[in-house]
Image (cartoon, rainbow, N blue to C red):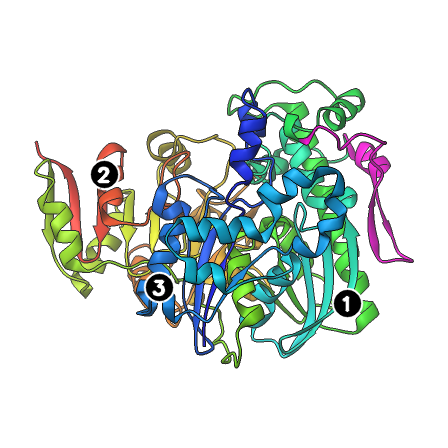
Amino acid sequence: MIVLGLSGLPNSRRKLHEGNPDIDPLDARICQGLDSAAAIIVDGSLVAAASEERFDGDKGTGALPRQAIAWCLAEAGVTADDVDVVAHGFDYDRHRRAFALNRTHFDEVLSSQTVRDALTDAGWPQLAAVLTPVEHHRAHALSATVPSGFDRGLAVVSDGMGEVDSLTIFRFVGTELEKLHTQPIAASLGILYSIGTRFLGFQFNNDEYKVMGLAPYGDPSRYRGVFQKLTRFDHDKGSVVIDWPSGALADAERGYPRARALLEEQTFTPAVPDGSIQRDEADFAASMQECLTDLLVSLVGHWLERTGETNLALAGGTFLNCKSNQSIADLPGVQRLFVQPASGDDGSSLGAAYAVAEDLRPVATPFDPYLGARYSADEVRAVLEARPDLRWREVGLTEEYLAAAADDIADDRIIAVFHDRMEFGPRALGNRSILARPDGDRIKDRINSAVKFREAFRPFAPAVHVDDRDRLFVTRGFEPDHYMLCTAHVRPEAKPALSGIVHEDDSARIQTVTPGLNPTFASLLEKVRDRTGTGCVVNTSFNVKGQPLIMDPATAVDTFARIALDRLYIEGFVVEGTQR
């Protein structure tokens, strides 16, 4: 059986902009169906998965993932005629009656027919004919439960909104899900955090990670009362309650102006972000982060106790918040924890495919997120031969090659690496990464100002060899550590060697690297340890501000040539920069 999973709503963003031609750029992503992606399962085994943004360069696009579909089919060695089922990670059709007053929006944006029409227009009528919609939160849940490897447990899904819910709790046994609890959109934790993000002058549904990075610089007590008045946890019902005043969630396409006005009345008037740390904004971010974490901890702790389950699988965009994930991981009732690396809507393509696939084969654990495109040495060589402005040499993926990269890192150079298959999800996990020495000279400033062009308050994450992790960090060692989805405390004695990745609260969003999951990266870290004493590097995504994670060699080489990197290590080639 061959199953193709899809995410995204092809008309959603276009219709938002057509109806609001003067929309503020900060509100340009206030719609559903973004982060479109495709995944393919063949005879019960996951073969490939990729986001459309990696192909078309439109970060977070919700367009039909045409190129991701074509690539998944090619990677699996099949054609559209071979596909038995196309699973789509939304099922608004069952809620048609709820949109009786807005039937045009339903028909043009939400209906499954819009996806069928898009597939037909793209030249795949055979895929349109076998489309099966899958409930959004069910898709998210299965994207975590199936690859977790857990035989049973609790699945928690939290995002901005699904079809009519914003949070769902399932008990799962194998691939069977039992829905225990749901919360309406008015009680959406994702929307609350995004409204706070927009209030601070960042882009809704895009820049929430910036707020998470800003929060450790603030004092959460300053605006704690605002969030305590707005939110609470109902222990009797096991539910989060958000007491928005009537009408506060109106005018979403204008950035929820009434909700933002409410926050401003109780706090301050935010300044336009300029990359610096402002006291009011940092304190607000800290208070909101504390609120989110406390509510999630109360929610998860309640349902673990109520069900007696000890295994936990998380998905949905809310769980890209690694600070909250750390507090959840620290709950004594959690014995095992898995967070889907593509917890946003891109991951719902994978979960939708799991929902309809038959005879799923057991997933090897830890889950392998390297599901994207790969390129041969010949393809890389052709790109480099077309760039006479660059100096390069071919070494091959050898010990000499990795030793040269380790030497560069030890000598405080900033390098980029491009190897093997691209990561699925928003994190660069060593195959499309910029790497540097964690105690390098002004390393954060150098990467931020010369390479990434981003806010100075945002931290950088470490990739650490599994053999070095426990002497450098305090962590329970759960699977989110493999995917930069959980922070850990830096041990006091390790701080001097890790000065470039220690955040303001002495935490770091770690990636634990194992030889089994990524042998090339693990070998590189071993060589870095031989030279520096620490098998740890700064690891940030190989891209620049506003650019998706780089997928192909041509884009990698072009980006390297435009920014202040010292060397590029790409499939056995060492690129050293422009000709002098």
- The x and y percentages for residue 228 are 83, 38
For the residues labelled 3 and 2, the Cα–Cα distance comes to 28 Å
For the residues labelled 1 and 3, the Cα–Cα distance comes to 40 Å
Horizontal side, residue 98 vs residue 21: left or right:
right
Q: Of discs 3 and 2, which sits in the foreground?
A: 3
Horizontal side, residue 8 vs residue 234: left or right:
left
Horizontal side, residue 282 vs residue 4: left or right:
right
Which comes before the other along the chain, label 3 or label 2?
3
Residue situated in front as seen by the camera: 126 or 334: 126
Which comes before the other along the chain, label 1 or label 3?
3
Q: Of discs 1 and 3, which sits in the foreground?
A: 3
Q: Quadrant of the C terminus?
A: top left
Q: Which numbered circle lies on residue 73?
A: 3
**Dot 1 amino acid type:** Leu
Q: What residue did someone put label 2 on? A: 558
Q: What residue did someone put label 1 on? A: 304
Q: Say if 170 sits above or below 554 in the image.
A: below
Quadrant for residue 72, please give it: bottom left
- The x and y percentages for residue 152 are 67, 77
In reply to whether residue 375 is colored magenta, the answer given is no
Say if residue 202 shows up in the picture: no
Classify mark 2: helix, strand or loop: helix
Residue situated in front as seen by the camera: 78 or 545: 78
Local packing at callout 1 (Cα closer than 10 Å; few below 14, some 14-19, many 20+) is some
Q: Quadrant of the N terminus?
A: bottom left
Local packing at callout 3 (Cα closer than 10 Å; few below 14, some 14-19, many 20+) is many
Q: How many marks?
A: 3
Classify mark 1: helix, strand or loop: helix
In this view, the residue farthest toward the right is 236
Q: Which residues are magenta?
A: 223-252
Residue sitting at x 64%, y 39%: 105
Classify mark 3: helix, strand or loop: helix
